[in-house]
Image (tube, helix red, strand yellow):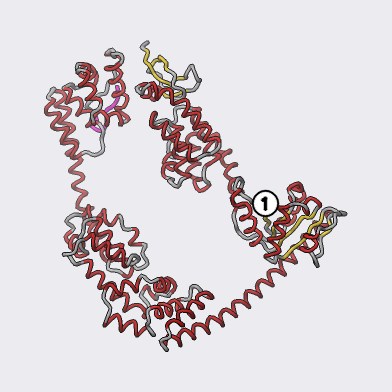
Amino acid sequence: MELTKVVCTSCGNSLQIDQNNKTQMCDACGSTFLVSHGLEFALKGTKEHKQIAKLRDNLKRAVDVDDHKNILHFTKEILRLIPKDDLANYYYAYANYKFGARRYLLDFYERVDFAIPDDLIELTSHIISYSDIRDKHLVEDFIAQNAPHKQQEYERVYNQKVIEEEHYSTIPRDVFISYRSTEQEIANQVIDTIESDGFTCWISSRNLRPNDNENYWTNIEDAITKASIFLVITSESAMVSPDVRRELDIAMKLKKARLEFKIDDTKHTSTFKYFFDGYKWIDAVNSFDEALKELRTRIYELLQDTSMKTTKQQEKIQKTQLDEYEKLLNRSEIELINNDFESAIDTCKDTLSLKPNASLAWWQLFLAENNFNSTEALNEFVIKKANLDKLMLLYQQSSYQQYKKYTTFTDGNYPKTIKQFEDALYEKLLYYINMAHLNADNKTSYIDAKCRSHILNAWNKLLTKYKFDTDTNLKQALESASDIDQLKTLFNDFTSIIEHPDYNRSHIQDYYTMFQEKLSKHKQQTTLTLTENQQLVEDLYEKIHIAFDHEDYEDVLNQTIKLFKYDNTHYQKYLYLLLATMKVNNTIDLYKAVQKFRKRKQCKLFESNLIQKLFEIEQTHELVVDLMMHCRHKKRKKENRITLRIGGDFHAVSEV
């Protein structure tokens, strides 16, 4: 049996093994690793071999405390040494996910080829515990493919996560429960009683997110603010609790509806006496069950009363605000007519403080800020005096943009107030973009600085990015369809344009329709071309196989070079290129041909782009590794060399 040196990818220990094994257990650390990884790792230096154990330990500690920053750091170091390590690749994807780069982990969930059972067990357990509930279907598929016996465990953990996320949400609740943590059992009974009637509760032991100490009191204050009733479970320990007293202070400032559930005979402290002055407590000292019944009734009545009061207050406030809004709107209109622009600006701002989405108030503010006493005055300015600079300055003003945001567009058309202004700006901007004598980059910088939010700014950036100096140039390209690939690239980068609110009112929509029609015709025309190309590729492979049979390596080389022009899918052309270069027609003789090279020439060959490409290809990876071992460590006997068959089905190079 021929032995080969490998290095354990967990501890860096060197071993002599039979390289025909797929996996190997390390006699030093007891871990199992892939032999192919051990062979590649053996080519690294002693320094790297010594580093791996420490990196693994550091990664484990980072994973144990869920330290995303260090997980990312240590996985990068491990992958630098062992690029295909399953665990390191998973934790690298997980850490990136936590920093917002979701793609790596979503791609990892699609994997099904895990050769080391211990690695699969570890990463599956981590996925079950730490996966995002948003990725449920992907995780379910991953577990079904790789660890089906873990499906029930995942379902249980997932359901618990959903419940916890519901508890941590900041939605308003009916009742906030203030209590001392030593009375948790009583608090749980109170919650069960209230929630059994369909009401919702907030309690710190359940609804505060763990380990979020930084936002502890912010979250509590937010919960008290949003709750309708502030319920205190009163006891001697609760009355001396600093946390309970602080919650009382917050509720007092917010003037919350309050209710006391008293569970012992301790007299009120001054704080509690003041807070509950005039309120009748629920006595739970003598009969706890009767107190719970009374609690249900009092909660219902208090919520009904609170709801009615809230509704009446809101109606009263809304009516008052509406009356005040109309008064202010009329006043600003009069101030505009009288050219009292400063007063009109102040009045419009007061109007918007009552109704921030009032489009008419935003329009009057825009007119006042620019000394126009009416829409007609604006239109007259647009016709007689406005150049591109002035129009862009008006367009970018916040008051104008807010008006566009809140006003109504009937059938997608501009309202009469701004139609003339918008049309004039669009026409002048497009004319400027089509000025061919101006530098394209200068035009882009100018428009972006002056009119950033306009759709033609986004359009001009796209034109410049794809080397169209003007809008007219693109139109000509569309009409001729001379370079459909360039047009396809541009229109594939079209998201920001389509999502712009003015897209459906622009000429760009017509361009997109024209492009779709041209693309459809192009696809019909190229279908035949693709069929012809496929036949050409098949013919080239046939010629190569015949040339190999006749040992005409120059012809093999010429035909293979042609393949790179027509065939972008199959890997075997790289192997053919190597064989023709070495003047052999099989991989067994390839060993001998490479061995004949001097050491420097061998190094140059193994560092070449061709060998690197073959190393990356799954079907030829093992051959490249074996060739390196043959030349640098121990010669392979003929019967032990890797044999790849040439010929037959041109789609495959199959192992014999």
Residue 168 in the image: above or below residue 446: above
How far from the left and from the top, in percent, is residue 366?
Answer: 40, 77
Q: Which residues are magenta?
A: 649-656
Q: Main secondary structure of the magenta part?
A: loop
Residue 98 in the image: above or below residue 201: above
Report if residue 524 is visible in the image: yes
How far from the left and from the top, in percent, is residue 210?
Answer: 61, 46
Q: Quadrant of the N terminus?
A: top left
How far from the left and from the top, in percent, is residue 9?
Answer: 43, 24
Taking the spot 24% from the left edge, 21% from the top edge, the residue there is 587
Taking the spot 39% from the left edge, 19% from the top edge, the residue there is 6
Q: Nearer the viewer, residue 636 or 38?
A: 38
Residue 510 in the image: above or below residue 57: below
Q: Is residue 43 magenta?
A: no
Say which quarter of the image contains residue 591: top left
Q: Quadrant of the C terminus?
A: top left
Taking the spot 11% from the left edge, 27% from the top edge, the residue there is 554
Q: Nearer the viewer, residue 284 or 274?
A: 274
How far from the left and from the top, in percent, is residue 468?
Answer: 21, 59
Determine crowd level at label 1: few under 14, some 14-19, many 20+ residues with C-alpha closer than 10 A: some
**Which residue appears farthest toward the top when viewing the image?**
1
Dot 1 falls on a residue whose secondary structure is helix
